[in-house]
Amino acid sequence: MARLTIISDPEKPSFAVEGDVYSVGRSKDNNLVLNSSQVSRRHAELRKNGEGFRIVDLKSMNGVYVNNLKVEDESLAHGDVIAIGDYRLLFEDMRTHKTGVEVMAEPSSAGIQRPDQESAGIADIGKITAASPDGPRFEAEVLFTLETPQFAPTVKIEDLAHLSHRRKLLLLYQVSSIFNSAKPLDELFQQTLDLIFQEVKATEGTVFLFNQEGALDTRVRAAAKGEPGSDLALARAVTERAIKESSSIACAGECLHPSGGQDSGGQGRSVICTLLQTQDKVLGAICLENLADARAFGEDDLDLLTAISNQVAIAVDRDLMQESLRQGVLQRANLERFHSPDVVSHIIQHSKGDKAFRGFLQEREVSILFADIADFTSLIERLEPQEAADLINEYFDAMTEVVFKYKGTVDKFIGDAVMGIFGAPISYGNDAELALFSAIEMMQAMERINAGNDGRKKFNIRIGINTGVVLSGYMGSKQRIEYTVLGDPVNVAARLQHIAEPKAILVGADTYAHVKGIFKFNDRGTTVLRGKRKETRFYEIIY
């Protein structure tokens, strides 16, 4: 027979699963009635499947979950946790698991029995030594690893005691529930250690995680009672060895003075460590210590801690993934303020965060566009502050949309001016041409804005464009960086915009050379631009 226990109910009521089909749902004609609005009238059935059972979702509204995975038709194993609505059910196959315990001998001490040197199956993997600057030296002999094929306990047990087994399953369920909350990771680690202390004979516990630089950080250290000790030397040494060997381990040994003599207490200590590991990487480890008993931990404890660590690793990996996605969304949102969508995709694809951007500069030929509002001061003086702000925002939105349309980058807004770059960070081969098409459409966008406004709000813009080799890349401090370009061609473009008449588009000689067969121009001759010694030839586009 089989049994279902409602572990989400404080009283933990149990129900025998009888017959070939056992129905579960809200309706009173079910074998097991779960009275909740989150449970469908006929939610699921447990069906006989040879010697075992399987669970079938009857097209319920909220679905059926087995061990946190949504299923439609799934075979059940002893110890599976089934989620139906807000109920959590523990499935137990009583035919394959005994309810009693056969004690073959009285225990002489709890936990590990030290194997003698000729015991089969015990791996001889040496000693772990660690020393802290302010504390004693430790030596610990590794007693067994998770892969150890045999281990001789003090008490021979045919199977886990039924009550103990259920308590361990409940502990795993509680750990899983903890990490379904939205609390900070360190708080969840603390809660997990508190649960472990209830079931495992540990006096202290530590959660280690690798940081972004690849160093092993101590995230949480806790004690079953009182405050944890400050000396992490042995725990860290065991953890580092476990990581190096990709193996969860248990060890025991004596606490020694640096001189090698035994301390006055002469008490042993034992440590177990399991890895927080996904399929492709180690995220950290959980390490438990008993400071008074060198025989505190058994193989069952190592198995239980491994199962808990697997659940914690999944939660940590999920948290890291969510943080990475959040940072990616934030990064994309910031980039999309200044770049067109395809430029943003290119940047994200070829870089990993600000470190890859900052300090990476390159020379490249670009076309720079400056556009501002002619006689801006007079425009502002005849408008109310809110009217002026609304008009400027409408103008910036329209100009930015045009720059993005023609694959440009909005470098910055300077007062009422817009600075656009064409050819960086991506060149399309016809960047000067794209800059001029953008300028012409900016004039058209200005006319559309004016058409919808009264005479007080009408304005004209003027544009300057120049082409040349600049230094481009992300520049700034650790707190704030931005993509920009530096060089004399940028200054020339700004000066051309400054001398342009309202509604005029002026371009430098290098820009003209790139597009003279595509657009019509008036040769405006030469002039000495502010800040320049030599004369600069420039042209006005006819549009």
Image (cartoon, rainbow, N blue to C red):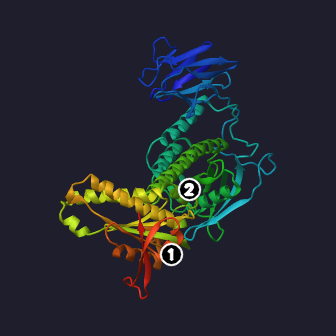
Relative horizontal placement of residue 59, taking residue 379 as reference (left or right): right
Report the residue at 73% width, 43% height from top.
Answer: 151
Question: Residue 156: where, in percent of width, then height?
Answer: 70, 35
- Residue at label 1? 510
Where 417 sits versus 247, above or below? below
Crowd rating for badge 1 (residues with CA inside 10 Å; few <14, some 14–19, many 20+) = some
Quarter that holds the N terminus = top right
Q: Earlier in the sequence, mark 1 or mark 2?
A: 2
Q: Are discs 1 and 2 less than 8 Å apart at CB? A: no
Question: Residue 484: where, in percent of width, then height?
Answer: 46, 70
The amino acid sitting under disc 2 is Phe
The amino acid sitting under disc 1 is Asp
Question: Residue 228: where, in percent of width, then height?
Answer: 49, 56
Disc assigned to residue 208: 2
User: What is the CA distance from the residue labelled 1 to the residue labelled 2?
Assistant: 59 Å
Whether residue 441 is visible here, answered yes or no, is yes
Report the residue at 43% width, 47% height from top.
Answer: 183
Of 416 and 447, nearer the camera is 447
Where 449 sits versus 75, above or below? below
Dot 1 falls on a residue whose secondary structure is helix
The mark total stands at: 2
